[in-house]
Structures are given as C-alpha cells and as structure tokens.
Amino acid sequence: MSDKATLMRAGTDTFTELEQAIEGLGDESMSRVWLGTWGVREILVHISGWHREMIPALERIARGATAPYAAGTYDDFDGWNARFVAARAGVKAGDVLDELRASHRDFMAAARAVPDEHFGPGGAARDLFDNCGPGHYREHAVQIRDWRAAGR
C-alpha cells in the first residue's frame, strides 16, 4: 500500500474512532466545559476549522505549489483555534457535528486530489494531512474517551 493510501485509510478509520468517541452525546454534554475552556463542541469546531483552513493548502499542493501556504501563517495555533471557536459561538452541537462531517468529507476529497508523491516522507502533504486529519482525530478521540470514562 502506498504512503498516500495508508494515510487516507488512517484518515477514514481515525475519523470513525472520533465519531464513536462522541456517539450518544447531546447538546448539553457536548457543551460542558472540561478541557480548559472547551467542551466536545469546541473540540469539534476547531477540527472543522483546521479542515477548512487546510483544504486550500492541499489544493495548492495538488496544483504544484512549492509551499502550501506562506511561512509563519499558522505559527499561532492557539490564536487560530480561538478564532475558529469564536466564529461558531452559539451554533448548536448537532449543527457543529454536521459541519465536522462535511469538512472531513471535503478535506479528504482535497487530499485525494493531491498526487501520491506528496504523501511520502518529507512530502508537502504528508504532515499537513496527518496533523489536521488522523493525528488530530486520534488526539481528541483519546481525550474525549478519557473524559467520558471519568464520568465527568
């Protein structure tokens, strides 16, 4: 299996794990703050935000750009995360979940359009995809499962 195929499969499988981690949570549970100033709702909003932000980067890689975005653009992760969450303030958890699914679908489609060689070691799409896809899903699925197991 190619590096791209392996990463794409991981993108699908780990997204399923994230969905399983939040299965059965309602608006109230998803809005309960437990991770700093965030609850599940904010976690999902910020994942969607990174999807939406990185889709054009993947599209630029697919078109042959030498860099997916200007150096330094995303150095302030916390600032970006705060902007993503602030922009979706007041959106119901169910709608946030719908947005997450749509942004994941679009993120995966953008990645599928990137030539395979960009997913190999050192490739322009490899870390970008993993950091905003499988690695990101794993990180937050574990946090959510732990939170749920602790019964908070």
Image (tube, rainbow, N blue to C red):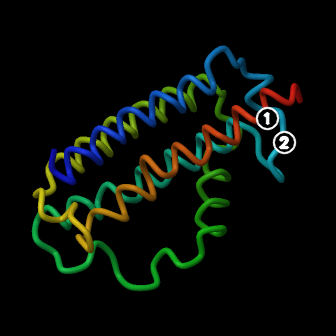
Q: Is residue 148 left or right of residue 60?
A: right
> Could you classify mark 1 by the number of other residues whose Cα lies within 10 Å: few (under 14), some (14-19), or many (20 or more)?
some
**Marks 1 & 2, CB-CB < 8 Å contact:** yes
Q: Indicate the quadrant containing the C terminus: top left, top right, bottom left or bottom right.
A: top right
Q: Residue at x 48, y 52 (%)?
A: 135
Outermost residue toward the front in this view: 1
The mark closer to the camera, 1 or 2, is 1
Decide which of 145, 74 is in the foreground and name it. 145
Q: Position of residue 94 (x, y in %)?
A: 60, 22
Q: Which of the marked residues, 1 or 2, is nearer the chain's N terminus?
A: 2
Tell me where residue 114 sits by quadrant. bottom left
Across and down, in percent, residue 69 comes to 33, 75
Q: State the count of labels.
A: 2
Task: Answer left or right for 69 relative to 137.
Answer: left
Q: Amino acid at mark 1?
A: Trp
Determine the residue positioned at 21% across, 54% down: 3
Which residue is rendered at x = 51% and y = 43% of the image? 137
Judged from the image, the secondary structure of the residue bearing numbered disc 1 is helix
Label disc, if present, on residue 147 of the rendered structure? 1
Figure check: 84 above or below 5:
below
Q: Amino acid at mark 2?
A: Trp
- Image: 25 above or below 69: above
**x, y percentage for residue 132?**
44, 54
Q: In which quadrant of the rendered view does residue 130 lie?
A: bottom left
Q: x%, y% of residue 43?
A: 64, 44
Is 117 or 32 nearer to us in this picture? 117
Residue behind mark 2: 34
Q: Secondary structure at mark 2?
A: loop
Q: Quadrant of residue 80?
A: bottom right
The residue positioned 59% from the left and 54% from the top of the image is: 84
